[in-house]
Image (cartoon, helix red, strand yellow):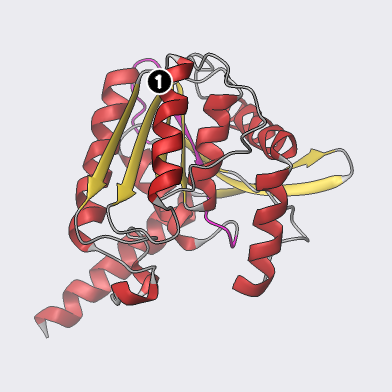
Amino acid sequence: MKHFILTLTFLLVSSTAFSQLKALDYKDGEQILSGFGIKPKSELKEKPGVLILPAWLGVDSHSKESASKLAELGYYSFVADIYGKDSRPKNPSEAGPKAGYYKKNYAEYQNRIQLALNELVKLGANPDKIVVMGYCFGGTGAIEAARANMKVQGVVSFHGGLGKDVTRPIDKITPKVLVLHGADDPYVPKEEVDNFQEEMRASGADWQMIFYANSVHAFTHKDAGNDNSKGAAYNQLADMRSWQALQNFLKEVL
């Protein structure tokens, strides 16, 4: 009975939090994009904001939950729509090519991120107090925001891809960079990690990289199962620790 009451309470709280999120349509040319924004009930003094870039399936419950949790902490939050309202993948088979397209055509990815940043500011966030964070494919996007030197104070990548075309120039990176990474992530080989770290050094970035033991890809996604042998799995401890690392980072840079 006690377990039932706790479960019901969690569902009611989650439902209430999600109800605070509002779908907000915006455009990239003729393409309609539809993100989700939320204002904090008790905003922080300087009205900081956090842009959330979802994983490869696009806007999902995980990114919405993060937005709601951040709003509870006093941050304006916006979940970006990278693909478009009528172009979101229906399954992983469709998500792979779509995410791959934006990774290859990174300027288009950066543009979609910037458009979402504009919506976060319209929502009420201070344009001088913004952090971009992302999960998996969205984590790659957060790094791209730093590479583009967008007007943000910092970026946070949760189990994101770190690679980039070697022919791309390495420019100075101004936003602070935090990478939260599964120590056993099979989708990001050691060479990619090493190259990323060299890129950060060459760019003069203020960067941090935290590795979580016994963690693979998607360690913050509760729906990823718990079988590390599949390459993607949830890890409760890494999820908790990485969320705390995010909060510490936000307090530092905002």
216 vs 156: above or below: below
Q: Quadrant of residue 94?
A: bottom right
Q: In the rendering, at what x and y percent does residue 138 appear?
A: 53, 47
218 vs 21: above or below: below
**How many tags in the picture?**
1
- Residue pointed to by mark 1: 201
The residue that appears at 56% across and 26% down in the rendered structure is 147
Whether residue 138 appears in magenta in the rendering, the answer is no
Q: Nearer the viewer, residue 231 or 241?
A: 231
Q: In the rendering, at what x and y percent does residue 170 appear?
A: 57, 21
Our reading of the magenta stretch's main secondary structure is loop
Q: Nearer the viewer, residue 106 or 50?
A: 106
214 horizontally vs 18: left or right = left
Part of the protein shown in magenta: 41-57
Indicate the quadrant containing the C terminus: top left, top right, bottom left or bottom right.
top left
Q: Circle 1 sits in a helix, a strand or a loop, which is it?
A: helix
Q: Residue furthest left?
A: 2
Of the residues shown, which amino acid type is indicated by label 1?
A: Arg
The residue that appears at 29% across and 28% down in the rendered structure is 249
Q: In the rendering, at what x and y percent does residue 67 appear?
A: 43, 46
